Amino acid sequence: MSTASPVRLGLIGSGWIGAFHAESIARRIPDTELVAVADPVPGAADRVAAPLGVARVYLDAADLLADPAVEGVIISSPAFTHADLVVAAAEAGKAVFVEKPMALTLEDADRAIAAASSAGVPLQVGFNRRFSADFAAAHRLVRAGRVGTPQLLRSLTRDPGLANPGGVKPWTIFLETLIHDFDTLNWLNADARPVEVVALADALVAPEHKAGGLLDTAVVTIRYDNGALAIAEANFSASYGYDIRGEVFGADGMVTAGDIHSTSARYFGAEGATAETTRLNIDLFRQAYTEELEAFAAAVRTGEVTGASGEDARAALALALASRASIERGAIVRLDDDGRVTS
Amino acid sequence: MSTASPVRLGLIGSGWIGAFHAESIARRIPDTELVAVADPVPGAADRVAAPLGVARVYLDAADLLADPAVEGVIISSPAFTHADLVVAAAEAGKAVFVEKPMALTLEDADRAIAAASSAGVPLQVGFNRRFSADFAAAHRLVRAGRVGTPQLLRSLTRDPGLANPGGVKPWTIFLETLIHDFDTLNWLNADARPVEVVALADALVAPEHKAGGLLDTAVVTIRYDNGALAIAEANFSASYGYDIRGEVFGADGMVTAGDIHSTSARYFGAEGATAETTRLNIDLFRQAYTEELEAFAAAVRTGEVTGASGEDARAALALALASRASIERGAIVRLDDDGRVTS
Amino acid sequence: MSTASPVRLGLIGSGWIGAFHAESIARRIPDTELVAVADPVPGAADRVAAPLGVARVYLDAADLLADPAVEGVIISSPAFTHADLVVAAAEAGKAVFVEKPMALTLEDADRAIAAASSAGVPLQVGFNRRFSADFAAAHRLVRAGRVGTPQLLRSLTRDPGLANPGGVKPWTIFLETLIHDFDTLNWLNADARPVEVVALADALVAPEHKAGGLLDTAVVTIRYDNGALAIAEANFSASYGYDIRGEVFGADGMVTAGDIHSTSARYFGAEGATAETTRLNIDLFRQAYTEELEAFAAAVRTGEVTGASGEDARAALALALASRASIERGAIVRLDDDGRVTS
Amino acid sequence: MSTASPVRLGLIGSGWIGAFHAESIARRIPDTELVAVADPVPGAADRVAAPLGVARVYLDAADLLADPAVEGVIISSPAFTHADLVVAAAEAGKAVFVEKPMALTLEDADRAIAAASSAGVPLQVGFNRRFSADFAAAHRLVRAGRVGTPQLLRSLTRDPGLANPGGVKPWTIFLETLIHDFDTLNWLNADARPVEVVALADALVAPEHKAGGLLDTAVVTIRYDNGALAIAEANFSASYGYDIRGEVFGADGMVTAGDIHSTSARYFGAEGATAETTRLNIDLFRQAYTEELEAFAAAVRTGEVTGASGEDARAALALALASRASIERGAIVRLDDDGRVTS
């Protein structure tokens, strides 16, 4: 409850993260209102909307985009729909928050950026780690010059599980998982430009699905134009929880971020010392997922994007595509000034 | 926004914690509504109410208690007013959340408990540490039997500052600060009964105010009827932040809780390793302050108090009064079954 | 092997710590030689001496003290023999290292100090924590003024086991265990003078032996003449290892020391995060036990005691005796300038 | 001092690590004796030998190898001399401890292994991390199956300084620094066979020496035949100390090792939380450097090598050479069954 007129948001795509965002808007973020939900699966939007008292429910995202009650949209539909929806939303004059990846090709990324720019609407991409208190503190230290020019960086994602390995699309580990790490590395490295990429990957968790294109374990090394060498790692079988860490090293120091202990409570017993760990990304990033939408709500009104921009999303995508090219060629690949793999 | 009809709460006392609670209700807790604020200082209630769009503002708490729009009240006025306000609120049929200490004498505590009981209203006391994720995890481990019967316990409060040492009332360190630690110890020790108390205290931070009754450093040792020995420590000059820790030790293990590092980010540089610390109790306990009110909002509807009860508050008060008696007598004091110091 | 003529040491008392010290001298400390071992139990000295190639073995400590090959002695016989042996060793002109407690009465402590002083021999007492790298680092920070004048201190000893509770002498917890903590507190508090002591204790680990005088759990609170309040805690049932920690708090900061994790290795698995702990004091204090004897060997030659002196041992003993008096009287006791409990 | 006849060792090469090893043998390790030192620089051997009372001093290592008093040798001369000296020592019937790298080519490595094998002498290589308590604990957990089959590994070396960047030979970062990490990865990965290597490197600390062949920052990614992907990182400008860490991740868990905090002491003050770090490898690895020589002394008598063998050294060298080939070719390189880069 507040005196300010709330920012009216619409949700496109009501999967788990969409549902969480819906709840954040309706219940955790002041001065915002969830006014509409769209999902092409019959009944899906209702399941999110009804408990939150949201009346406007659509099967077709286009209808939501045409709804004048909606000031801004949160796009959390499947990745392959993102770019078109960003363009459509921008053309409808809506502020846009889109989950990562914003697009699956650089062309689509460029279209999305151009559409938002032409329409003059803010475009924010869901790189939530930028809003994590841990990573934000690390970033402040780096930006304050405490490590000097970065020389070595690391970002990793270890996900607890792979419920349905047969359903994972080829290149998901780069386009949907490591894309977070690529954005984190770019951001921590002061937006330096990647010039070389080499990736190694395998299906170690579910080798029976490798033939179908599954890669569940990957290491990507990146050389940036400021000299820094960066490593991104991902894997889908973290038995101990949701493990996200980062590290920036330079001649003046090192910053680390990330901790999967769920609380400060520690137990010491006959077996030694033990502590509980965080199992779900929703628990690890509750604060970050909430704050990124608070930032978006502010952007709807001010026009100022403080989270990851369309350009940031394109830069992360360029690394995902370069990783794929490196795997396909079995080689180190070089990137041109535009982020494209040189032939 | 939600479909459920929100729990309508009134705030009595608009100091810093009252203002924070008001904001929690208005902006951080779903399904609640702040409908009224009372403060006898002209303009004070307005300063909290206006930015949150709360229309009902009272100088006299009695008027707020008479307001039928109010289902439950949060009492965050000065400590000496608490017991009478609890009684009045209960008699007005309102659910009651009262900041610690609930009362300053055992008689007043008994009156408050009796009033709530007669009126059949829930009575919750603001021992927020019970809602801290860190302390709650420690408590779960203790209750699960992981340490065995507690043999040694520790709870400490180190507050960063004493803005106006001349304005601190005598015995504040026991009645308003260590009362948190007393509740924590009782709670972690499975509500065992204290049988002996000895306190040592001094004015070390601001010795010039000792003559006026200031005690800013204290150590209290408690013997419980389950044999456990417990230590409560407090001090008002923590230069490094807001330091709240607990420890429970038994023959089967030890549990510790509390950490003042503000994030997981760590910096390593020429000077060694460094980390930022948490400076404000509002930052350290943001989650706990919010969850205790969520629990209260639930209690307003269910009648079930899940936080600290009036009886818990009386038990903590008994330890504060025993500490005072120990200081006054310069002796170990014994408590009877009713928590009173034996003559 | 070295060019310097080694410091020739004799060992009196061949229990576990004596045997460890013998091995340190023979194998871990350069420029020292273990030349003689005495133990009144037939065969006991041999069991230590033979594997180390030590030829001189005595039943009577007096014979070892009369041996001109011995420059300095390590007294690790039972506590009740310490003071007389220190006096005899000093009178024989030997440098003296004596395990804690140096004496069991202040009179005996004074006799021991006087004997060493008259003979002009160095007298060092086995307060090994002063040589622990962890505690030494904490002490340096305190002495460098980083915490300001101490206001609150804590030192604790949690021992993993009580093999034979029926064999523990009354007051052992104060005279043999907490005496370490008393020395640590005095040392960390810049040798301020204790003025008040209150102790609570019980037999919680082995209550069936309480009637025989066993106290296995104790909390002692001390007020010093610089205002600081200090807590010493001990217990004999640490299931998780050998737990020794210290803490010094003042208006300018806090220093903590002590960690029972046995290495930096950490394991994260389905059960959460785990780490191994240190089980034996010989493992926790291997470095400290070795360095205290290196310091003693140096003192034999230089005459300069860098570890705990006879006066330090007397000051720690005064706190143990005051704790006993507090328990016996059920009261806070005061100490005069000489460390004696006032009547 | 001991009854056993000491193991008589000779030192070849009296630089800083040679001098430290000499002191370990003479002063820190029981049952060993340093009987001879050889160094071609006039006076160098004397500077190490004299203070330790070692009489036999040689300019020519051949003379030391011909000395019947010597049972085993420690070779800590420059890397390019290692292989020939191992061969000569083995042919002289001496047990051999050689610092890393044992050789600079696979042919030389094979010669060294064959010579020791023919002579029937133990050959141990100075991969000290295997003896670090931290890494050994991690290794035990991995070998006990606690992480499952490794999927991701990491080992890093960050050295505090580059006193003379102009004097660093090309490829030093692979052949002398990362060779430690390569051995650690092989060892933690249960001696799986590397099949692919890709390295990125640069001169970021001292770019002015890049033209001379300096590489001071490197990231190497390795694919093993058990599927695991491993990362080795090195850099020569760690402002905060000597940073050596390792990590092994598999579907059943993760183990980490390495910590540069120099003690458990922690300071909390107005600037936040701080801790001291370890600055020198001699401090970080004092225990490991000592234990690897204790193991060697045992091997001299038993013939059983418990540290890294010649084959282990060859396997680590193969990774260093593959890294160099990867840099030279700007490509991912493949290794054959024999550890050679395929053309």
Image (cartoon, coloured by chain):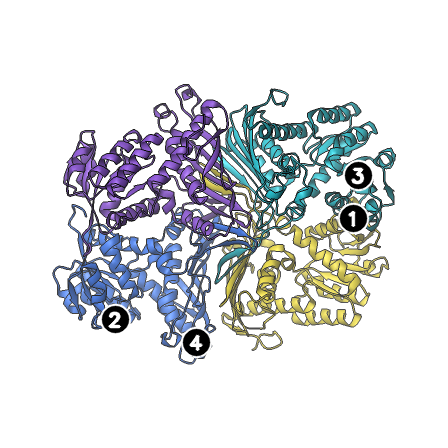
Chain colours: A purple, B blue, C yellow, D cyan
Q: In the image, what residue type sits under mark 4?
A: Arg
Give the SS element for disc 3.
strand
Residue C2 in view in this figure: yes
Residue contact at pointers 2 and 3, CB within 8 angstroms: no
A214 vs C151, nearest the viewer = A214
**Residue D12 marker:** 3
- Say the numbered circle drawn on residue B81: 2
Q: Quadrant of the N terminus of chain A?
A: bottom left
* The disc label shown at residue C49, or none: 1
From the viewer's side, name the closer residue of A263 and D271: D271
Marks 2 and 4, Cα distance to the nearest angstrom?
28 Å
Query: Which residue in the rendered view is the most extreme toward the left?
Result: B68
Q: Report x, y in % for residue B150.
A: 44, 54
Q: In what element is the residue under mark 1?
A: helix
In the rendered structure, are the residues bearing label 1 and label 4 in contact, judged by CB atoms less than 8 Å apart?
no
Q: Quadrant of the C terminus of chain A?
A: top left
In the image, taking residue B302 as reference, residue B317 lies left or right, namely right
Q: CA distance from mark 1 to mark 2?
A: 75 Å
> Alpha carbon of mark 4 to alpha carbon of mark 3: how far?
75 Å
Q: Which amino acid, mark 1?
A: Ala
Location of mark 4 (residue): B329
**In this rendering, which labeled residue sits more in front, label 3 or label 1?**
3
Is residue B283 positioned above or below D153 on the image? below
Q: Mark 2 touching mark 4, by CB under 8 A?
A: no
Front position among marks 1 and 2:
2
Q: Is residue B50 left or right of residue A129?
A: left
Question: Which subunit holds the residue at mark 4?
Answer: B
